[in-house]
Image (cartoon, rainbow, N blue to C red):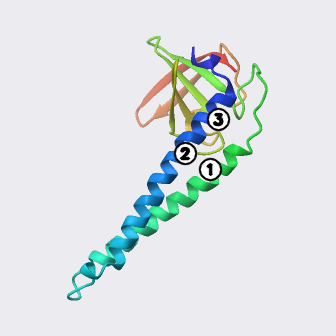
Amino acid sequence: MVTNVPKVELIRLILAKLNHDLELFVNAARTAHEAAIDGENQPDNKYDTTALEASYVAQGQANRAQELRRSIETYKQLALSPASDIVRLTSTITLEDDSGDQKYVFIGPLEGGLKIFTASGSVMVITPASPLGKVLIGKSPGDTVEIKTGTSSTRYQIIDIT
């Protein structure tokens, strides 16, 4: 069961994934920057935008790398909450939908949508500001929450919190 994975291990896995992604974005930004300043890509006429487009890509990659650096620092300094019967920041929650499928989420301060793979299953990082995070905060095992997306909705029962 994923909720048996220690929180410090989850944080270690989150940091490993963020550091891996940071390395990818730094390399991508470097490559795009080199393409932007390469003599081969300098415009031949006013309609040739290859270098300009490469510079936009480089800036976007550099911006994402900076966001990842901030996230890494935030997770390094994150104070883990003790086990509780109430969902809060750094809780790991087991949810079960109406068809009996279970999913595991970790409420982190940043990087919602990040998926972490442990030996006992995957855990999705969500934030308190996300739709699911908003309805989970303050809830307890046995509570049911509903997430509406467009015209459909999904109900989850909280099975376990660590």
Q: Indicate the quadrant containing the N terminus: top left, top right, bottom left or bottom right.
A: top right
Q: Which residue is mark 2?
A: 18
| Residue 49 horizontal/vertical position (percent) | 27, 78
Residue 107 relative to residue 43: left or right: right
Q: Secondary structure at mark 3?
A: helix
Visible in this render: residue 35? yes
Question: What is the CA distance from the residue labelled 2 to the residue labelled 3?
Answer: 10 Å
Question: What is the CA distance from the residue labelled 1 to the residue labelled 3?
Answer: 12 Å
| Residue 101 horizontal/vertical position (percent) | 46, 15
Judged from this view, the residue extending furthest toward the bottom is 45
Visible in this render: residue 126? no
Question: What is the CA distance from the residue labelled 2 to the residue labelled 1?
Answer: 8 Å
- Contact? badges 2 and 1 (CB < 8 Å): yes
Residue 134 relative to residue 24: left or right: right
**Which residue is depicted at the point 74% across and 23% down?**
86
Residue 129 relative to residue 32: left or right: right
Q: Which residue is mark 3?
A: 11
Q: Secondary structure at mark 2?
A: helix
**Which residue is depicted at the point 36% across and 79% down?**
37
